Amino acid sequence: MPKMKTKSSAKKRFKVTSTGKVMAAQAGKQHGMIKRTKKFIRDARGTTTLCAADAKTVKGYMPYDR
């Protein structure tokens, strides 16, 4: 049986924790920070865990990262 391939875009953007949750960067921070509120910028700092539905899709992209 040949090995399954990992999506290169997924391995650059996501990380699976030891408990199996998927970590991702916060959305909406690439540009346009002037129009964002200070509260939004504060709350969107760092990374976040994906919801279960999105995490299932991402885990399909990375079959060996579990």
Image: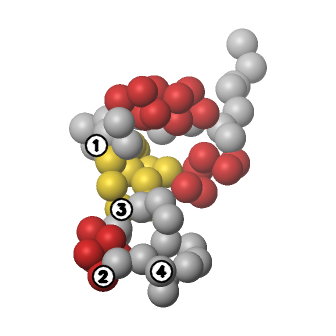
Q: Earlier in the sequence, mark 1 or mark 2?
A: 1
Residue 34 rendering spot, x and y as whole percentages: 48, 86
- Residue 35: numbered disc: 4
Foreground tag (3 vs 1) = 3
Tell me if I can see residue 63 in this picture. no
Measure the alpha-carbon separation of dots 3 and 1. Answer: 16 Å
CA–CA distance in space, label 3 to label 2:
17 Å
Instruction: Tell me the distance, in whole angstroms, between the alpha carbons under discs 3 and 4.
Output: 21 Å
Q: Amino acid at mark 1?
A: Ser
Which is more toward the observer, 45 or 1? 45
Q: Which residue is depicted at the point 43% across and 34% down?
A: 55
Q: Position of residue 23 (x, y in %)?
A: 38, 50
Which residue is identified by label 2? 38
Kindly identify the residue that appears in the image at 32 percent across and 71 percent down: 40
Furthest residue to the right? Answer: 2
**Earlier-in-chain disc, 4 versus 1:** 1
Question: Which of the labelled discs sits on residue 47, or is there none?
Answer: 3
- Residue 17, position as x, y percentages in the image: 32, 46
* Above or below, 25 relative to 16: below
Kindly give the residue lying farthest to the front in the view shown: 35
Residue on which disc 1 sits = 18
Q: Secondary structure at mark 1?
A: loop
Instruction: Report the residue at 37% width, 42% height from top.
Output: 50
Identify the secondary structure beneath mark 3: strand
Name the residue: 53% across, 29% down: 57
SS under mark 2? helix
Q: Is residue 18 left or right of residue 59?
A: left
Task: From the image, state whether disc 4 or disc 1 is nearer to you.
Answer: 4
> Which of the two labelled residues, at mark 3 and mark 4, occupies the earlier sequence position?
4
